[in-house]
Image (cartoon, coloured by chain):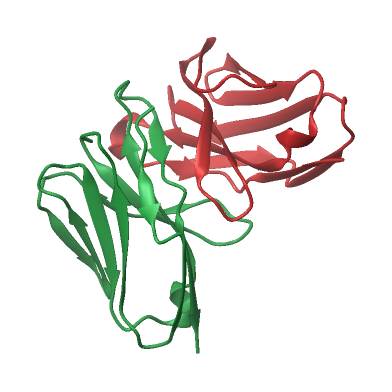
Chain colours: A red, B green
Amino acid sequence: SQTIHQWPATLVQPVGSPLSLECTVEGTSNPNLYWYRQAAGRGLQLLFYSVGIGQISSEVPQNLSASRPQDRQFILSSKKLLLSDSGFYLCAWIGEATNEKLFFGSGTQLSVL
Amino acid sequence: TQLLEQSPQFLSIQEGENLTVYCNSSSVFSSLQWYRQEPGEGPVLLVTVVTGGEVKKLKRLTFQFGDARKDSSLHITAAQPGDTGLYLCAGVSNSGYALNFGKGTSLLVTP
C-alpha cells in the first residue's frame, strides 16, 4: 500500500536559520508531489509541485525552494527563514491510478521565532 | 491561479441542525473535491464531483456540483459533533497537475 512520510512533525527555528523538510512516498512510482502551506485553521496555499525528478514548478514567489532528487523524495528548503514562513506545511502526492485524489502527509508545524 | 471562494468562513451550530457550505469560482473545473481536516492533521478526501449537476451522498453529507462546473455545495443533515472540522474544496488547475484549494469553512458542532 502507498504511504507518505513527512518529518519532522514540529520545528522551531530562529529567524535567519536554514530549513529542510523532507517528504518521501512509498508504494508508488512516478507520483506527482506537492508542498502546501496552511495558515492556522485556514486553506492550503500551493507552494511547489513536481511531476518528475528534477522538475519543480513554483506557484508563488517566496523565500522557499524545493527539490526532487529522487522519484519519491521531495524536499522543501530555505537558506534564511523569515517570520512569515511560520505555518503548517503539508506534503502530498497523486499517483496515476488515483484519479486526482491527493494523499497528504501528517504535516510539519513550523514556528519561526 | 484559479480562485475558489468558500462561504461561510466560520459556522457554529448545535447538534441536530442542518447546514450548507458553498464553494464558488469564476473558473470552470474539470472536477471539484471536498476535504475535511482536523487540527494538526492533513486533509482527508470526502468526495470528488466530476459531472455538471452531479449530486453525491455520503451518509448525512450531500455534495452537489454546479451545472456549469464552477461551483459546489456541501449540505450536512442533522449535524453531529463529529462533523466538526475544516471543510476545504479544491479544483484541478488549468495545468492539470495542481489542486487549488479554497480557504475553507471552519465548522463547529456543539452538543
Residue A22 occupies which quadrant of the picture?
top right
Q: Would residue A46 be seen by someone viewing this image from the given angle?
A: yes
Front-lying residue, B87 or B2: B2
Q: Would residue A27 be seen by someone viewing this image from the given angle?
A: no
Q: Is residue B57 above or below residue B24?
A: below
Name the residue located 65 percent from the left edge and 24 percent from the top edge. A75
Q: Quadrant of the N terminus of chain A?
A: top left
Name the residue located 40 percent from the left edge and 61 percent from the top edge. B8
The picture places residue A13, in percent across and down from the top left corner, at 86, 37
Q: Is residue A56 above or below residue A98?
A: above
| Residue A1 appears left or right of A4 | left
Name the residue located 66 percent from the left edge and 25 percent from the top edge. A76
| Residue A99 appears left or right of A42 | left
The picture places residue A47, in percent across and down from the top left corner, at 55, 28
The single residue placed furthest to the top in the displayed view is A54
Number of dots carrying numbers: 0
Front-lying residue, B57 or A72: B57
The picture places residue A102, in percent across and down from the top left corner, at 41, 41
The picture places residue A29, in percent across and down from the top left corner, at 44, 25
Q: Quadrant of the C terminus of chain A?
A: top right
Q: Is residue A21 above or below residue B75?
A: above
